[in-house]
């Protein structure tokens, strides 16, 4: 697996914006079964080993999991405020839940769980996300789950980009580059009009 | 038209985050003709008069216009870093181009154009967005167009939310509220699990 050309630019943007904790957040667009788009913020959890796949996490009970099962193509939009850069990363989303057979993925799921904070792990004990909330808050104040083994509803998600657009608003004129994966698994690079 | 309950919360978030210029940026998800989602950053240009419709602008030659003509439902995801709030606003997108017959909308299109900076207006003279870029940059350095009358490819877009989710990460537990427009044009309010 060769490191994609956009990955170096993304890594540099992360580094240059690292003073802003929320520069690790991006917005993920998926499509629901009714054909409507959905969009929410997720937290970047690094790349999977030496691949170009972006890791983030979700609760297997959340709507995005159902959406991804229906339409696995997603697009991430990632804006970096300090360097005024935008990355749009489109590609296949892969769900790594408790029953995922791939051992590499299962190991990544476990490691990602272990690297979470207690308060992040605690969220996977909360009641079903998106359902009507009970007036009694006590279900939100259990003890954090053990770091050793992920809870069954803990889901790692991988985004494998096949098309990446990089926009730099600081350049004059703004620069915009398109990176595309061809059938031979090679990345093409093309300057396009902003 | 009654002011929607979420609009007050959004206005407050804008106010509290106003020290960050990029707190006026949000990510807009649309769906392309092939059923894949698309996602990009746009700049909030205020509400249309006393409606609950959010204004932003685009070039009529951009891909999002074609996508909206195909599927008019969109979802905006708007994260406010300082107050750690997220708004997800789903609803119909309405394109207000040079040929839009609605006079209120046409006036809003004109006013929005007039309120832009010269450098923002200049972008509408640039070559076709997304196409292969010419090595010669000179087409990007024309004189800014006159503020009086919008260029034909200047397009105002209105998002009329019908479903809004508000997540506040600062609360303990996180609070998450769902606002939905019913058939009688009234907004329901429901606390849901984060």
Image: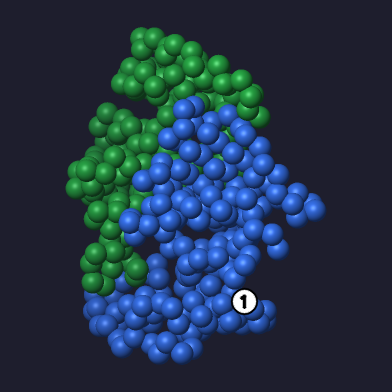
Chain colours: A green, B blue
- Assign a secondary structure to mark 1: helix
Q: Nearer the viewer, residue A167 or A62?
A: A62
How many marks are shown on the rendered structure?
1
Q: Nearer the viewer, residue B117 or B41?
A: B117
Please state the horizontal and vertical placement of residue A17, each as a whole percent of the image: 23, 47
Measured along the vertical axis of the image, is residue A129 above or below residue A102?
A: below
Query: Can residue B34 be seen?
Result: no
Q: Is residue A120 left or right of residue B30?
A: left
At a point 46% along the width and 63% down the height, the residue shown is B44
Query: Can residue A128 be seen?
Result: yes
Q: Nearer the viewer, residue A53 or A38?
A: A38
Marked residue chain, label 1: B
**Figure quadrant of the N terminus of chain A:** top left
At a point 51% along the width and 47% down the height, the residue shown is B87
Q: Residues within 10 Å of mark 1 (few under 14, many from 20)?
A: some
Which residue is situated farthest in the right direction here? B184
Q: Is residue B44 left or right of residue A46?
A: right
At a point 29% along the width and 40% down the height, the residue shown is A21
Measured along the vertical axis of the image, is residue B112 above or below residue A101?
A: below
Q: Which residue lies under the disc numbered 1?
A: B105
**Figure quadrant of the C terminus of chain A:** bottom left
Please state the horizontal and vertical placement of residue B182, each as a whole percent of the image: 75, 49
At a point 24% along the width and 78% down the height, the residue shown is B137
Please state the horizontal and vertical placement of residue B143, each as a whole percent of the image: 31, 88
Please state the horizontal and vertical placement of residue A92, each as a whole percent of the image: 45, 40
Measured along the vertical axis of the image, is residue A78 above or below residue B95?
A: above
């Amino acid at each position: 697996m060769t490191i994609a050309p956009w990955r170096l630019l993304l890594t540099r943007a992360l580094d240059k914006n690292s003073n802003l904790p929320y520069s690790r957040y991006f917005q993920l667009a998926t499509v629901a079964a009714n054909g409507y788009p959905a969009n929410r913020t997720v937290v970047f959890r690094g790349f999977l080993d030496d691949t170009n796949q972006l890791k983030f996490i979700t609760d297997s009970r959340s709507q995005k999991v159902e959406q991804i099962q229906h339409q696995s193509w997603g697009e991430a939009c990632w804006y970096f405020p300090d360097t005024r850069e935008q990355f749009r990363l489109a590609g296949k989303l892969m769900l790594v839940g408790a029953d995922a057979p791939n051992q590499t993925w299962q190991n990544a799921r476990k490691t990602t769980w272990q690297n979470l904070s207690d308060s992040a792990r605690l969220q996977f004990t909360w009641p079903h996300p998106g359902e009507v909330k009970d007036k009694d808050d006590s279900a939100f104040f259990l003890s954090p789950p053990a770091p050793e083994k992920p809870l069954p509803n803990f889901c790692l998600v991988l985004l494998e980009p096949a098309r990446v657009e990089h926009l730099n608003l600081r350049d004059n004129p703004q620069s915009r580059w398109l990176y595309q994966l061809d059938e031979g698994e090679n990345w093409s690079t093309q300057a396009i009009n902003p």
